[in-house]
Image (tube, helix red, strand yellow):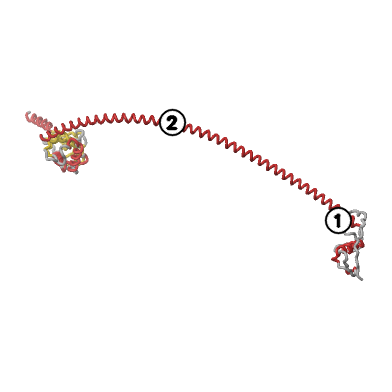
Amino acid sequence: MMPKRKTCAALVLALAMTGCASTTIEPGHRGLYFAPNDGGLRSEALMPGKYKLGWCFLYCTSNRIDDFDVTYSTRTEDIDTKSAEGLDLHLKLSVIYKPIESELYQLDTQIGMNYYDEVIGPEFRSACRGVFARHSYTELQKRNESIENEVEAEVRRRTAGKHVEISSVTLEGVNYAPEIADKIRQKIAGEQEAARQQAAMTWEAEKKRQLAESEAAQKKLEVQTRAAQRKLELESDAEAQKMQLAKAAETERFKAEQELAQIETQKRVTKADAEIARLKAETAAATKIIEAKADAEAARQMARAHAEERRAETAGVTPMEVMIHGYDALAQLGGSGTTIVLGDWAHVPNFLFPRVPAMQNAFTLPYLPYGPAAPAPGPAVPVAPSKAVLTASP
């Protein structure tokens, strides 16, 4: 019975000593799995959760997870340094930082889990001493933010490539040396007195400014009133001038309309006169034409009457009468006491009696010099013989 009991007890103890080792990564953390017997440190970052490390049987596994807090962390450092004047300064500064998630493997393999004490802390303290040594103690309150930014930039420069991110640096407190404190108190008292005097001066200046503004406002109001009055006067004058100009323009327009009407009337009168003159000229021309036609008709009738009369006269003229008249004409041509000698009548040149029918043919119809022959010749008109005496030589 005893061996059986011992065997059972051993089995229970073995089961009790056998189990699964695990660990948990909290929110805001990342982990790197490290297995010494299975490839070492893995580069893949593990998200928050529970992870198995291995089985434990009389011996626990050496596997582990390096846990990194990836949230922003704050560390405060007491810094003893000197100002630009060489006075001691006791400062309290804080730095806010966190590891870069994508570079956790490099951070763990190159620096380790204690990266603040290895990298950030020394660089932060050195940067603070270097920056504050370049500034006067009087600048700590006036240029607080710019000095913090300067320290932050210096720490970032020093930790570049160290797989950490510096968020900001803040100045938490300043403890001055006793002599600096006395000077600061004196300075504060002087500043307060200066502020009081400045406030009094400001009040006086404000009173003067308000008085000047009141006087200026009064003057401005007076100027505006005078300007308004002047404006009203100018507007009244302008309105009166406008009315005068309008009246003058209306008068000129009326005059121009009258002149235009007169010109138009004159044009119509001139046109009527021209029309009357034209009608008169046409009437006179028509009258002259009628008179000319009447005169022409009268002349034509007279010519016709003369022609008829000549025709009547020449109707009964014989060649002998023509010859007698020729002799009479020669007698008149030669005048008195003139002797004209004629030879044989048959040898007289024809040009002496051109186109005389009596000389051409004594038996033809009488010559009609003034027009066509009358339909019925009138009675013969006797011609008186010439009284000229012709003397013929033998």
Residue closer to the observer: 24 or 193: 193
Residue closer to the observer: 327 or 291: 327
Quadrant including the C terminus: bottom right
Quadrant including the N terminus: top left
| Residue located farthest toward the left when viewing the structure as drawn | 2
Residue 379 visible in the picture: yes
Quarter-of-image position of residue 108: top left
| Dot 2 amino acid type | Glu
| Dot 1 amino acid type | Pro
Asked if residue 342 lies left or right of residue 30, the reply is: right
Return the x and y of residue 312 as percentages of the image width and height: 90, 55
| Residue located farthest toward the bottom when viewing the structure as drawn | 394
Asked if residue 329 lies left or right of residue 224, the reply is: right
Q: Which residue is mark 1?
A: 372
Return the x and y of residue 371 as percentages of the image width and height: 85, 56
Quarter-of-image position of residue 260: top right
Q: Which residue is mark 2?
A: 233
Does 243 sit above or below residue 288?
Answer: above
Please rate how many residues cluster around mark 1, counting C-alpha atoms within 10 Å: few if below 14, some from 14 to 19, many from 20: few
Please rate how many residues cluster around mark 2, counting C-alpha atoms within 10 Å: few if below 14, some from 14 to 19, many from 20: few
